[in-house]
């Protein structure tokens, strides 16, 4: 049975290490760790198919702007007949503390336009891994904040490594153990230099 792991982000090098691209960063780290083949572009989506232990997995990065993520993901789900219970979307979440991870199935999108787009095309019955990017402390515009670069990239990379290290637990649908394993005892902060 195929599993689909999708990361949300924006295409282009100017967005590569921004808060809104944590989904892409996680997918790239999974690809590297498990030696997936190079991503191939099909229409407006990047796809790589490989294995994580005994699981056959499709890695997906919609190659559209965040707000249009639903159609490319739906095209892959339809083409490969992926059950939504086998779909996991990695995305940034401003309402969660920096580098804190939460796993959730269904529910609201907390104003996340990438999730709204997916919900419009596929409904809400899929798994989400919510990567906390924190909320701006000052009155910075939220759209500017999510498109800005991390200050504590080391903490982000450590959190992503921890996700990748325990990714098999997600594929096994052992979400509670996954969350316990990746819970960081340290409180990271993303404070400008």
Image: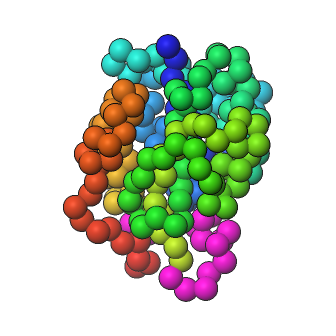
Q: Residue at x 64, y 41 (%)?
A: 124
* The magenta stretch spans residue 25: no
Q: Is residue 76 above or below residue 151?
A: above
Where does the image place residue 119, in percent across and percent down from the top left? Answer: 70, 43
Where does the image place residue 39, in percent across and percent down from the top left? Answer: 58, 26
In the picture provided, is 74 more to the left or to the right than 55?
right
Q: Residue at x 24, y 65 (%)?
A: 186
The quadrant in which residue 168 appears is top left
Where does the image place residue 57, in percent across and percent down from the top left? Answer: 49, 21
Could you tell me which quadrant the C terminus lies in?
A: bottom left
Where does the image place residue 90, in percent across and percent down from the top left? Answer: 52, 44
* Residue stretch rendered in magenta on the structure: 137-152
Q: Residue at x 62, y 60 (%)?
A: 110
Q: Is residue 149 above or below residue 78?
A: below
In the picture provided, is 160 more to the left or to the right than 85?
left
Q: Is residue 92 above or below residue 148?
A: above
In the picture provided, is 130 more to the left or to the right than 47?
left
């Amino acid at each position: 049975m195929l599993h689909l792991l999708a990361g949300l982000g924006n295409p282009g090098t100017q967005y590569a290490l921004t808060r809104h691209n944590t989904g892409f960063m996680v997918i790239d780290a999974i690809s590297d760790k498990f030696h997936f083949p190079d991503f191939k572009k099909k229409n407006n989506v990047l796809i790589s198919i490989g294995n994580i232990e005994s699981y056959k997995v499709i890695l997906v990065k919609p190659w559209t702007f965040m707000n249009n993520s639903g159609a490319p993901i739906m095209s892959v789900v339809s083409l490969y007949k992926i059950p939504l219970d086998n779909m996991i979307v990695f995305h940034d979440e401003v309402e969660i503390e920096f580098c804190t991870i939460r796993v959730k199935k269904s529910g609201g999108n907390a104003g996340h336009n990438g999730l709204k787009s997916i919900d419009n095309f596929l409904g809400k019955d899929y798994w989400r891994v919510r990567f906390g990017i924190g909320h701006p402390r000052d009155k910075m515009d939220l759209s500017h904040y999510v498109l800005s670069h991390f200050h504590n990239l080391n903490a982000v990379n450590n959190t992503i490594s921890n996700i990748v290290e325990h990714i098999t637990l997600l594929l096994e649908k052992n979400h509670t153990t996954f969350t316990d394993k990746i819970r960081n005892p340290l409180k990271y902060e993303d404070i400008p230099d």
